[in-house]
Amino acid sequence: MAKDIYVRPRSGWFSDRSVCYLAAGRPVVTQDTAFGKFVPTGEGLFAFSTMEEAVDALARINRDYARHSAAARRVAAEAFGAGPVLRRFLADAGIA
């Protein structure tokens, strides 16, 4: 569960602990703060706003854990890996 200060304004906040779980190949189901506008969701990473959405996400993961585990690793590498993060940082700084 995310703190209300992150949920209500739809800030896109995302836990560093969730990033660690993704990198370890552990699917993540976490409260929606609008991070889906920055990070792909639906495989390996799920955002929920209601109890029903959380239960559905867990059921989807349980039906094919291997696929969601691989997707979790992929999300971590593509969205939070050093290469993609540094490229964006350098581009935003006008260096690359």
Image (cartoon, helix red, strand yellow):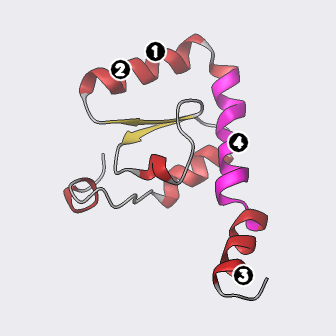
Choose the circle earlier in sequence order: 3 or 2.
2
Q: Amino acid at mark 4?
A: Arg
Q: CA distance from mark 4 to mark 2?
A: 22 Å
Residue at which label 2 appears: 55
Residue at image x 35%, y 27%?
A: 54
Labelled pair 1, 4 in contact (Cβ < 8 Å) = no
The boundaries of the magenta stretch are 67-82
As rendered, which of 26 and 35 lies closer to the eye?
35
On whether residue 62 falls in the magenta region, the answer is no
Q: Which mark is residue 59?
A: 1
Q: CA distance from mark 1 to mark 3?
A: 40 Å
Choose the circle earlier in sequence order: 4 or 3.
4
What element does badge 4 sit on?
Answer: helix
Q: Amino acid at mark 2?
A: Val
Q: CA distance from mark 1 to mark 4?
A: 19 Å
As rendered, which of 13 and 40 lies closer to the eye?
40
Residue at image x 28%, y 20%?
A: 52
As rendered, which of 24 and 36 lies closer to the eye?
36
Q: Amino acid at mark 1?
A: Ala
Q: Which is the main secondary structure of the residues drawn in magenta?
A: helix
Q: Amino acid at mark 3?
A: Leu
Residue 78: x and y in percent read 71, 52
Left or right: where 84 falls relative to 63: right
Labelled pair 4, 2 in contact (Cβ < 8 Å) = no
Other-residue count near label 1 (Cα within 10 Å), few / some / many at <14 / 14–19 / ≥20? few
Other-residue count near label 4 (Cα within 10 Å), few / some / many at <14 / 14–19 / ≥20? many
Mark toward the viewer: 3 or 2: 3
Residue 79 quadrant: bottom right
The N terminus lies in quadrant: top left
Q: Which mark is residue 73?
A: 4
Choose the circle earlier in sequence order: 1 or 3.
1
